């Protein structure tokens, strides 16, 4: 979905949820921030600088990106967590896993951090894959955290574990959450509601719920 007429400022350290119906442009919003796409007009600014002026690799190192389907590869759990910082020590990898609450999950695997991961993580559950992905993001210590429907494919128990890990990961970071479930959006400092590629509402959960508008309609649909 193409985005139109967007003029929004993300404040340092805040968590912003992006919600809307399927096809509203939520994932496109995140991909523009990550420079998976470049804008055809206008600009995306970071600290007042057009992100196209940054070295792409250096810019990406400032980001932690956790998609709905994390990209795991054949290797060990440690290798997958250290993907963004292959020079990291074992202690740093363990600290990243501990920081997001993934240490118990890793300890439960045969071999722990040396547990062999199949290509795309096929021998792990969806929740285990996401916890590894969150530990990977924590290890690179990103300035900006982008979560693209990170809990959409999880069962309720796994979702609860990943939401807790996400809360730990996003502390003191600027975080953008594409929220599939509105319970996730309600935890954010601020919510952007997209319709057909445009931001139609911008505010806190309680503010938007008090208005008879798109956000309230989304919450009603989620209740049925």
Image: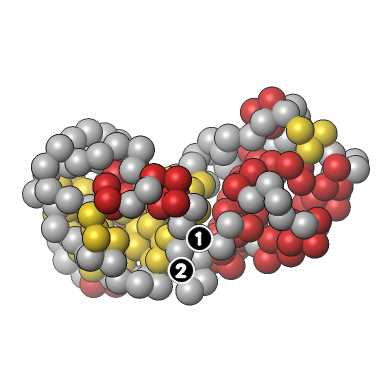
The numbered disc on residue 167 is none
Residue 171, relative to residue 2: is it above or below? below
Residue 20 placement, left or right of 177 = left
Coloring basis for residues:
secondary structure
- Quadrant of residue 24 in the image? top left
Q: Residue at x 18, y 35 (%)?
A: 2
The reply to whether residue 103 is in sight is no
Q: Quadrant of the N terminus?
A: top left
Tag 1 residue: 142
Is 142 on the left-hand or right-hand side of 213? right
**Residue 91 can be seen in this image:** yes
> Which is nearer the eye, 111 or 41?
41
Residue name at image x 19 percent, y 61 percent: 8
Q: Earlier in the sequence, mark 2 or mark 1?
A: 1
Assign a secondary structure to mark 1.
loop
Q: Quadrant of the C terminus?
A: top left
**Residue that numbered label 2 is attached to:** 173
Tell me where residue 128 sits by quadrant: top right
Label 1 near label 2: C-beta < 8 Å?
yes
The answer to whether 89 is drawn above or below residue 204 in the figure is: above
Q: Is residue 140 left or right of residue 53?
A: right
Q: Residue 43, image x and y in percent?
A: 17, 50
Near mark 1 (Cα within 10 A), the count class, few <14, some 14-19 or many ≥20, is many
- Residue at x 45%, y 45% (from the top left corner): 57
């Amino acid at each position: 979905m193409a985005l139109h007429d967007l003029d929004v400022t993300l404040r340092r350290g805040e968590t912003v949820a992006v919600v809307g119906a399927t096809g509203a442009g939520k994932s496109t919003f995140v991909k523009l921030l990550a420079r998976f796409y470049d804008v055809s007009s206008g600009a995306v600014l970071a600290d007042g600088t057009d992100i196209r002026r940054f070295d792409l690799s250096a810019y990406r190192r400032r980001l932690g990106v956790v998609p709905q389907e994390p990209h795991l590869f054949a290797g060990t759990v440690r290798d997958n967590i250290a993907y963004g910082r292959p020079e990291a020590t074992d202690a740093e990898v363990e600290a990243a896993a501990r920081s997001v609450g993934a240490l118990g999950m890793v300890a439960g695997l045969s071999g722990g951090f040396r547990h062999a991961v199949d290509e795309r993580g096929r021998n792990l559950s969806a929740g285990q894959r996401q916890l590894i992905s969150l530990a990977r993001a924590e290890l690179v210590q990103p300035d900006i955290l982008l979560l693209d429907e990170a809990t959409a494919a999880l069962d309720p128990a796994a979702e609860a574990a990943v939401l807790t890990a996400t809360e730990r990961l996003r502390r003191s970071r600027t975080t953008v959450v594409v929220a599939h479930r509105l319970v996730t959006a309600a935890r954010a400092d601020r919510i952007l509601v997209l319709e057909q590629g445009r931001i139609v509402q911008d505010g806190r959960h309680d503010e938007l719920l008090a208005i008879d508008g798109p956000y309230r309609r989304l919450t009603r649909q989620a209740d049925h």
